[in-house]
Structure formats: structure tokens, C-alpha cells
């Protein structure tokens, strides 16, 4: 299967060329009773209906003919497949988060040896940065996957939340 790769971003899946729409509700941590981390080789099923729409170029046609046809593809929730690749996208740490980690480590490792005034000052600095640290931890690690569906289609760079364990 040749052609441009499709990439997605939550909550509406969008691709190039055209658009993909994720209908229904993806599996959430509350519904799944814990964070789901997909693994290569794991069997999964599509958690919600998926619709891909855009221009199509027949295989073997020159790239300048792109857009000669318009097409739409609908995949129903429940279609099963196998995870071929899992990509974790790191969260960006702000300066405040890095500083919190540095100061917290210093406090944990050497706080018991510090004079009380210095330790108190360090505790205050850590406390002032704790809100940014908590906010950073709340943001989920973005995970995308490549899944080869049993019907032969491959979904690449799809959000992990689009799938549930089979």
C-alpha cells in the first residue's frame, strides 16, 4: 500500500491529505481501570468508529496526479489488529519543572545535613514550584501506535486511546 502516511492528533484525527474523524468515545483511564500501555505484538481492537476522507492517488500514478479521486474509508469500532510499533512522545519540561526536580533532589539527598535555615529556605523554594510539578505530572505522556488491522489496513501514528485490548 503506497501513498502518503497519515498522522493524527487528538481529539479529532486529522491526516494528510484529507481528514480523519474519530467518532465515539475512546477508552479512558477511568473506563479501563488504569493506564493502558500498548506493547508491540499485542492484539487490540478499534475502540470507536473511524472515518478517513481525502484525495486518493492510485498506485503507480505520478505524484502530480494527487487529488484525481476523492475517497472516504470507514472503519467500524471492534476491528482487531496487532500493534507493530509504539512511539512515546516526551512531554516538554519547563524551566520551573527542571528547577523543581533539581531542588527536590538536593533537599531529599542533603536536606538532613543542611543547617535548619538553609533547609527551610530550600523547602520554601520547592513548595513554590510544586504547582508546576503537579501540572506537569497530570499531563499524559502522548503515545502513538502503528497497528496492522486484520483486514489489511495499517493505521500509523494513531493515538493509543483509539484502541482497546482485544
Image: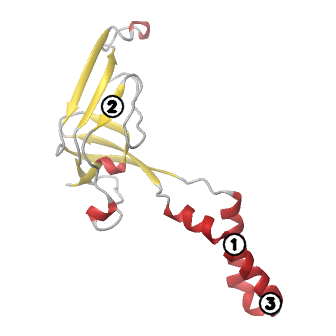
Q: Vertically, is 153 above or below 88? A: above
Residue 32: image location, x then y, percent: 27, 63
Q: Looking at the picture, tell me which residue is in the foreground, 80 or 94.
A: 94
Residue 147: image location, x then y, percent: 30, 43
Mark 1 or 2, closer to the camera: 1
Q: Vertically, is 58 above or below 86? A: above
| Residue depicted at x 74% and y 86% | 110
Circle number at residue 114: 3
Quadrant in which the C terminus appears? bottom left
Task: Name the secondary structure under disc 1.
Answer: helix
Q: Of marks 1 and 2, which one's residue comes earlier in the chain?
A: 2
Which residue was labeled with disc 1?
128
Q: Of marks 3 and 1, which one's residue comes earlier in the chain?
A: 3
Quadrant in the picture for residue 129: bottom right
Residue 14: image location, x then y, percent: 39, 32
- Judge from the rendering whether residue 101 lies leftward or rightward of residue 54; answer left or right: right
Q: Are marks 1 and 2 in contact (CB under 8 Å)?
A: no
Amino acid at each position: 500500500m503506497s501513498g502518503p502516511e497519515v498522522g493524527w492528533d487528538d481529539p479529532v484525527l486529522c491526516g494528510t491529505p484529507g481528514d480523519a474523524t474519530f467518532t465515539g468515545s475512546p477508552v479512558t483511564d477511568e473506563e479501563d481501570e488504569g493506564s493502558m500501555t500498548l506493547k508491540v505484538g499485542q492484539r487490540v481492537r478499534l475502540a470507536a468508529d473511524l472515518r478517513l476522507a481525502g484525495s486518493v492517488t492510485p498506485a503507480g500514478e505520478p505524484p502530480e496526479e494527487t487529488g484525481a479521486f476523492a475517497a472516504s474509508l470507514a472503519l467500524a469500532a471492534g476491528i482487531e489488529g496487532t500493534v507493530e510499533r509504539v512511539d512515546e512522545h516526551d512531554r516538554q519540561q519547563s524551566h520551573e519543572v527542571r528547577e523543581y526536580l533539581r531542588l527536590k533532589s538536593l533537599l531529599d539527598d542533603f536536606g538532613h545535613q543542611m543547617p535548619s535555615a538553609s533547609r527551610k529556605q530550600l523547602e520554601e523554594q520547592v513548595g513554590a514550584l510544586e504547582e508546576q510539578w503537579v501540572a506537569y505530572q497530570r499531563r499524559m505522556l502522548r503515545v502513538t501506535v502503528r497497528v496492522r488491522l486484520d483486514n489489511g489496513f495499517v493505521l500509523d501514528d494513531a493515538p493509543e486511546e483509539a484502541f482497546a485490548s482485544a
